[in-house]
Structures are given as C-alpha cells and as structure tokens.
Amino acid sequence: MKRGWNNFLAAGLLALALAACKVEYDPSKASPSARHYSDAVTQQQFKNALEKAGIPYGVDYSDGREFVTWSKEHDPAVEKLLPLIDGPRRNYVSFPDDALNNAFLDWLTKKGIPSDSVVVDGKQYVIWQGEGTLAREFFELSKGIRKP
C-alpha cells in the first residue's frame, strides 16, 4: 500500500509542477533564417542590401561556408530584396582600377541599367542586370576601340 501511495503522490506533484510551467512560443527565440551564396561577390552584395534596408544580420559558419542569418520577423523584408540579388541575367566585373569601375557604374546608370557595386577582399566589383557584353562594350568605348 505504501508503494501505491508514493506513486500517487509523485504523479500528483508532477502534474502540479507541469501545470505551474507556462510554455509560450517566442518567435524571436526560433532558429534564424539563413542564406549562403557560393561566390563572395553575391554574398557581399546580399549583406550590403540587408544593411542598406536596415535589417540586422549575423554571420554563422558551417562546413567551411559563411551563412548570413537574420531573425524570422524580417523574412518579408528580405523576400523583397532577393530579386535584386538573384535577378535575371546578373553579371559582375572588376576593372583594373576603381576609376574605371566607377565610370562603368555611371555609364550603366545613365543607360538605365540596374547596377550596384561591392567591395570583396579590397577589390571593387560592379554588378548589373542585363547583357553580359556591356562590360566589353564600355571598355572598348572608353579606350576608343569602339565608336558610340
């Protein structure tokens, strides 16, 4: 009889302890969203876009790869940025000097071509959407090889 009483008492105490625990879901404690780009230029462009949009982010490493992370509450805002990063026919180039990179960026802007610039490992890259031949066209125009 004593053993039955102990089991009953233990079960009652456990039920009280569980009832006293208040379990709430806190979305801020959920695993963060994450994204990884295999090339450093796109990865940096993504981090720059998050920063420009005011979205706080962190960086985690797994299996030697860098993952950009952000809290799930920012998922809708990040979704709006992705077409700029993952857009169609995205190209990038780095000319030998920053002056030429900046001139190319200005040239693209004047032509109404969506473009951006990022720095990766101290080297400036110009990124644009559209024809991949635009960098060659610009370079030939700037060197007088091609006429406008």
Image (cartoon, grey):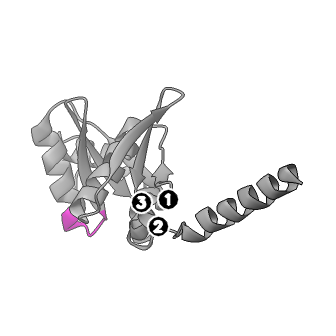
| Residue nearest the viewer, comparing 67 with 28 | 28
Secondary structure of residue under mark 2 = helix
Q: What residue is disc 2 on? A: 27
Residue located farthest toward the top when viewing the structure as drawn: 64
| Residue nearest the viewer, comparing 35 with 83 | 35
Quadrant housing residue 95: top left
Secondary structure of residue under mark 3 = loop
Magenta-drawn stretch contains 33: no
Distance (Cα) linking label 1 and label 3: 38 Å
Name the kind of residue labelled 1 in the image.
Ala
Q: Nearer the viewer, mark 1 or mark 3?
A: 1
Mark 1 nearby-residue class (10 Å; few <14, some 14–19, many ≥20): few
Quadrant housing residue 131: bottom left
Q: Nearer the viewer, mark 3 or mark 2?
A: 2
Secondary structure of residue under mark 1 = loop
Question: Taking the image as drawn, is residue 80 in sight?
Answer: yes
Task: Name the side, left or right, on which 5 lies relative to 116.
Answer: right
| Span of residues in magenta | 109-114
| Residue nearest the viewer, comparing 146 with 137 | 137
- At 73% from the left and 59% from the top, the residue drawn is 9
Distance (Cα) linking label 1 and label 2: 5 Å
The N terminus is located in which quarter? Answer: bottom right
Q: What residue is disc 3 on? A: 130
Residue 69 location (% of width, % of height): 41, 50
User: CB under 8 Å between callouts 1 and 2?
Assistant: yes
**Secondary structure predominantly adopted by residues drawn in magenta:** loop
Q: Which circle marks residue 30 in the picture? A: 1
Task: Name the side, left or right, on which 1 lies relative to 147.
Answer: right
Name the kind of residue labelled 2 in the image.
Pro
Residue 26 location (% of width, % of height): 46, 67
